[in-house]
Amino acid sequence: MTTLSIRINDLLAHELEAVAKDAERPKSYIVQKAIEAYLDDYADLQIALDRLRDPGDTVVSSNDMRQSLGL
């Protein structure tokens, strides 16, 4: 496990303290979960952007999608 030191503003520190207290978890746990969620979202965004930029990836219109779903 790696130790990471960060600086955050006072408001964010108070919010983190409140969430950690409410969740009955250490602040480090809350920060780790937040970083994991951010990295997952970032990876999803990169995949979406790669697909959007891929000229070989077929674009389906909303009308075609509705029709294929029988809506």
Image (tube, grey):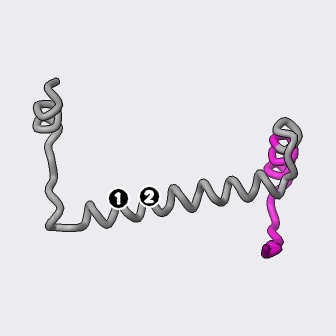
Instruction: Name which residue lies at 11% across and 38% down.
Output: 64
- Image quadrant holding the N terminus, namely bottom right
Frontmost residue, 7 versus 37: 37
Label 1: which secondary element: helix
Residue placed farthest to the top in the image? 71
Label 2: which secondary element: helix
- Image quadrant holding the C terminus, namely top left
Instruction: Name which residue lies at 15% across and 52% down.
Output: 59
Q: Which residue is mark 2?
A: 44
Q: Amino acid at mark 1?
A: Ala
Q: Is 8 covered by the magenta stretch?
A: yes
Q: Amino acid at mark 2?
A: Asp
Asked if residue 21 lies left or right of residue 33, the reply is: right
Q: Which residue is mark 1?
A: 48
Question: Which quadrant of the view contains residue 65?
Answer: top left
Specify the segment rendered in magenta.
1-19
Q: Is 15 covered by the magenta stretch?
A: yes
Point out residue 68 in the picture as x, y percentages from the top left corner.
12, 34
